Image: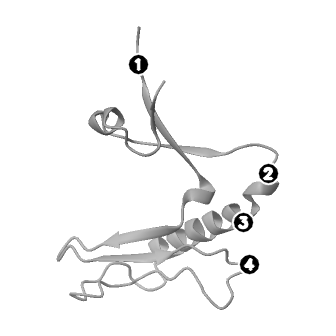
Amino acid sequence: MTFETRATIQICDILAIEYECPKCRAKSVRPIVDPSNREGRSNAIPRACGNCNALWIPENSQVEQDLRELLNSIGEFRSEGERLPFAMRFEIFVPENNAESGAVGAQKV
């Protein structure tokens, strides 16, 4: 018998994105919002570390554009997810020892 450990999340489970500075290890967590219903908020993308000011993403770079598109898409699908004619889940990596310890979302199949 073979066991496979899998963990999945629905797009509605993605609430925020965490950025971590490789230089000073400071973290910044930003909520992901639906760009069509943001109530004055936007998917803010930090260009530099708020702690040590290390440059992360140059202004108007391809990385900034791609990241903004990704965050906007996640925000849109989160609000539209209930209207989709199917369930959509992302499979995520869970180390073996986490599945055995009963980590949230981990299941033996």
Amino acid type, mark 4: Ser
Secondary element type, mark 2: loop
Residue 36: image tag:
4
Please give the residue where the numbered disc 2 appears in the rendered image.
84
Secondary element type, mark 3: helix
- Which quarter shows the N terminus? top left
Q: Is residue 64 left or right of residue 22?
A: right
- Residue at left offset 73%, top offset 80%: 37
Determine the CA span between mark 3 and mark 4: 10 Å
The image position of residue 95, as x and y in percent, is: 31, 38
- Residue at left offset 74%, top offset 78%: 36
Q: Dots 4 and 1: beta carbons under 8 Å?
A: no
Residue 15: image tag:
none
Please give the residue where the numbered disc 1 appears in the rendered image.
3
Q: Nearer the viewer, residue 13 or 55?
A: 13
Determine the CA span between mark 4 and mark 1: 43 Å
Determine the CA span between mark 2 and mark 4: 17 Å
Determine the CA span between mark 1 and mark 3: 35 Å
Amino acid type, mark 2: Leu
Q: Nearer the viewer, residue 63 or 5?
A: 5
Q: Nearer the viewer, mark 3 or mark 4?
A: 3
Mark earlier in primary sequence (3, 4): 4
Determine the CA span between mark 3 and mark 2: 10 Å
Dot 3: few (<14), some (14–19), or many (≥20) neighbours within 10 Å?
A: some
Mark earlier in primary sequence (2, 4): 4
Dot 2: few (<14), some (14–19), or many (≥20) neighbours within 10 Å?
A: few
Q: Is residue 44 left or right of residue 85?
A: left
Determine the CA span between mark 2 and mark 1: 31 Å
Please give the residue where the numbered disc 3 appears in the rendered image.
79
Mark earlier in primary sequence (3, 2): 3
Amino acid type, mark 3: Ser
Amino acid type, mark 1: Phe
